[in-house]
């Protein structure tokens, strides 16, 4: 399996003034390479009589690595570093999203049509026939992205405001990949009762609710209660979005190895939101033996209750053909633990339990990390399909349909397709909408 290069690197850009004579640019790039820096784009900004200014994109391991490169560059005669630019910070400045009008506003007549007095007739129609809100408002194409910031990426409980860049990123993916308006909602509370009540009260604004980065075990109760109370789709992405992509990856991994997934022993290391969601979906698909391990005895008991078998780390590694790790503990899986032919999905971000190349070198048949097994392959199409079908909920048949659609678009030798393959998201949406109708999760078209 090919692992995409550069995904685990930090991107920095240096702006340098270079003496405009033969050899100086070469000495600069040699200095960068001597410290293990990978060079991306080299762009000429200005050219003068004796000097020119260039921007050079670098891929570095961390800030200390960058400092070593900058020191090496400082020793090169005729080269001066003017500025170090952080492209990640640049793209986040001012936020990544904004509310934009879809209609023209150029004349007083436009105002009268979109606002008073014209809008009154639309309000009356919706009052008499509430289903018209999906036709005449943005409700049917809007998804609330709700977090309390207790489980942000691999960073943990950093609070809702610090998690806002992640929510904005989800909004961008919704917009660009499937045309949905994703609206971040930050909740400054850890109380499940308050979270449930708040979401229920704002739910009329949205066509669906996407729960994001809410820590286990509260996330399970919050989702369950919302599904019971609301008549629009609710999905905790950390559980189900991740599970869908993992199932898609395993459908391909077992196909490549001529193994029937339902008969394979799957081990889950880490039974938080993602691990539990993966285990439940695999069992719903028909996997007969799902081992699980976690430091929390409560999580282990829940795994047993859901139909899995609890064991320890050694038991998972020794008995499982397929190992899925979602612990947030870098380096937890040692190379000597890997058995020949195993499939290893070490999904913790930003640092995996074992690197894919390390797992492959230790004998794994396939290996991937959370940079490629990414729930962004799943959630846009799942919500697009649910909204298109006017589904009341998202069920396992819809999730499994999404997994199958994703698996079909992977290139030969790869477990999953690329996130920016637009055909994948359209196929997921179509499969989910069809499954929603066939499973009774959506009302038949009028």
Image: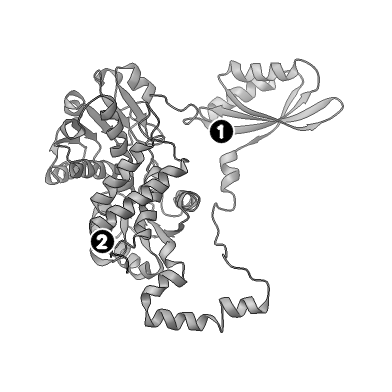
Q: Residue 250 location in percent, x, y?
A: 28, 33
Label located before the other in sequence (1 or 2) = 1
Is the C-beta separation of discs 1 and 2 under 8 Å? no
On the rendered structure, is 118 left or right of 233?
right
**Element marked by disc 1:** strand
Residue at image mark 2: 227
Residue 260 is labelled as: none
Q: Residue 258 location in percent, x, y?
A: 23, 25
Residue at image mark 1: 11
Q: Out of 79 and 40, give the one closest to the viewer.
A: 40
Q: Out of 146 and 205, give the one closest to the viewer.
A: 205
Q: Quadrant of residue 68?
A: top right
The relative height of residue 104 versus residue 74 in the rendered view (above or below) is below
Q: Residue at x 28, y 48 (%)?
A: 399
On the rendered structure, is 383 left or right of 222?
right
**Element marked by disc 2:** helix
Can residue 211 be seen here?
no
> How far separated are the C-alphas under marks 1 and 2?
41 Å
Q: Residue at x 27, y 49 (%)?
A: 216
Q: Residue at x 31, y 49 (%)?
A: 215
Q: Residue at x 42, y 26 (%)?
A: 3
């Amino acid at each position: 399996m090919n692992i995409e290069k550069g995904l685990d690197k930090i991107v920095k850009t240096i702006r340098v003034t270079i003496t405009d004579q033969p050899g100086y640019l070469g000495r600069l790039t040699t200095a960068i390479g001597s410290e293990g820096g990978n060079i991306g784009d080299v762009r000429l900004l200005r050219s003068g009589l004796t000097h020119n200014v260039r921007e050079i994109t670098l891929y570095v391991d961390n800030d200390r690595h960058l400092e070593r490169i900058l020191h090496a560059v400082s020793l090169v005669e005729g080269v001066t570093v003017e500025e170090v630019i952080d492209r990640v910070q640049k793209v986040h400045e001012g936020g990544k999203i904004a509310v934009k009008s879809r209609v023209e506003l150029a004349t007083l007549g436009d105002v009268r049509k979109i606002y008073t007095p014209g809008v009154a007739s639309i309000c009356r129609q919706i009052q008499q026939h509430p289903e018209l809100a999906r036709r005449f408002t943005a409700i049917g194409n809007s998804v609330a992205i709700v977090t309390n910031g207790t489980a942000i990426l691999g960073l943990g409980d950093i609070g809702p405001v610090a998690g806002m860049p992640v929510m904005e990123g989800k909004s961008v993916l919704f917009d660009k990949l499937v045309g949905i308006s994703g609206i971040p909602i930050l909740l400054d509370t850890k109380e499940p009762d308050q979270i449930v009540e708040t979401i229920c009260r704002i739910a009329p604004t949205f066509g669906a609710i996407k729960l994001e980065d809410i820590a286990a075990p509260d996330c399970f109760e919050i989702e369950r209660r919302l599904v019971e109370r609301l008549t629009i789709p609710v999905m905790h992405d950390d559980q189900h979005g991740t599970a869908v992509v993992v199932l898609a990856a395993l459908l391909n991994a077992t196909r490549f190895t001529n193994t029937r997934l339902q008969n394979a022993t799957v081990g889950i290391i880490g039974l938080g939101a993602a691990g539990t969601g993966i285990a439940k979906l695999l069992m719903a698909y028909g996997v007969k033996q799902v081992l699980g391990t976690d430091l929390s005895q409560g999580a282990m008991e829940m795994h047993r209750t859901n139909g899995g078998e609890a064991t320890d780390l050694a038991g998972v590694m020794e008995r499982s053909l397929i190992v899925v790790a979602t612990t947030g503990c870098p380096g937890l899986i040692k190379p000597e633990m890997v058995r020949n032919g195993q499939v290893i999905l070490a999904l913790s971000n930003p640092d995996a339990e074992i690197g894919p190349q390390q797992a492959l070198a230790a004998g794994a048949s396939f290996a991937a990390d959370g940079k490629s097994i990414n729930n962004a392959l799943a959630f846009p199409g799942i919500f697009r399909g649910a909204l298109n079908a006017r589904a009341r909920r998202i069920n396992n048949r819809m999730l499994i349909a999404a997994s199958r659609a994703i698996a079909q678009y992977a290139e030969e030798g790869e477990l999953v397709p690329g996130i920016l393959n637009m055909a994948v998201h359209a196929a997921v949406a179509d499969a989910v909408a069809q499954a929603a109708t066939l499973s009774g999760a959506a009302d038949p078209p009028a």
